[in-house]
Amino acid sequence: MVSSEEAVIVNTLVRQALVAAEEVMGANGLHAVLRNSGLERFINNLPPDDLNPGIKAVEYAKFNEAIEAFYGRGGRGMLRRIGKASFQYGVREQGALLGIAGVALKLLPEKQRIKFILNALVNALKKTNAQVQAWVDDADGKLAYVESTCAICMGRHSEQPICHLYIGSVGEAVRWATEKEYEIIETHCIAKGDPYCRFEVGEARV
Ligand SMILES: [Zn+2]
């Protein structure tokens, strides 16, 4: 198990998060938040597209916290939108594989499609960073993406779940696989004292 001091986010994922954040918040918003979270070195200076360590996970958590603080009541919605944009960026940049899978997916029942895309997320994250401990939970007929190394809340404390960016990414992934909007519920969060963050796929919104 990697301690929170050692945990890192690789460059390509930092890059993905910053591009997505700029899409949603604009350059000025992003720069303000980077300054507020001590990450001003990334202003007009994206990290390279490689798998070297980019920032500490605790710094990434501070970045998320700064977005929430900067936008106040709108912060959660903003983080969800960044999460969505982040998944879309992933499909755009590394989408060849998902593109082919997308065609085959249409033949599968909806639950299998959701399972496929959650597993794809787990595998993609593990491939980029060996520290990541994530899995798909299929107990009680509910599908969920679970991670015990969640970087969004690393070192943070809260009464409520706070990994809004992940809710956006998981929701967008499920929408990509099913062409439907599903409610995503963060049932567990490390910031609350749970052993992992768990994002459950709820009901489809019709
Ligand atoms: Zn979390």
Image (tube, rainbow, N blue to C red):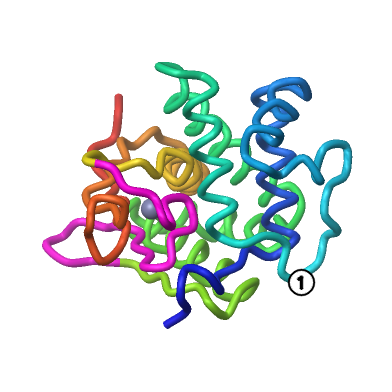
Left/right of residue 148 with respect to residue 12 in the rendered view = left
Task: Look at the image and say whether residue 148 sits in the magenta stretch.
Answer: yes
Location of residue 154 (image quadrant): bottom left
Label 1 crowd bin: few (<14), some (14–19), many (20+), radius 10 Å: some
**Point 39% across, 33% down: residue:** 181
Position in image of residue 54 (x %, y %): 73, 62
Q: Is residue 113 left or right of residue 78?
A: left
Image: 135 above or below 84: below
Q: Nearer the viewer, residue 93 or 37?
A: 37
Q: Residue at x 22, y 41 (%)?
A: 159
For the N terminus, the image quarter is bottom left
Q: Which residues are magenta?
A: 137-158
Choose between 131 and 121: the one closer to the eye.
131
- Vertical comparison of 91 with 64: above or below: below
Q: Percent position (x, y) of residue 171?
A: 43, 41
Which amino acid is tagged 1?
Asn
Of 20 and 60, which appears nearest the observer? Answer: 60
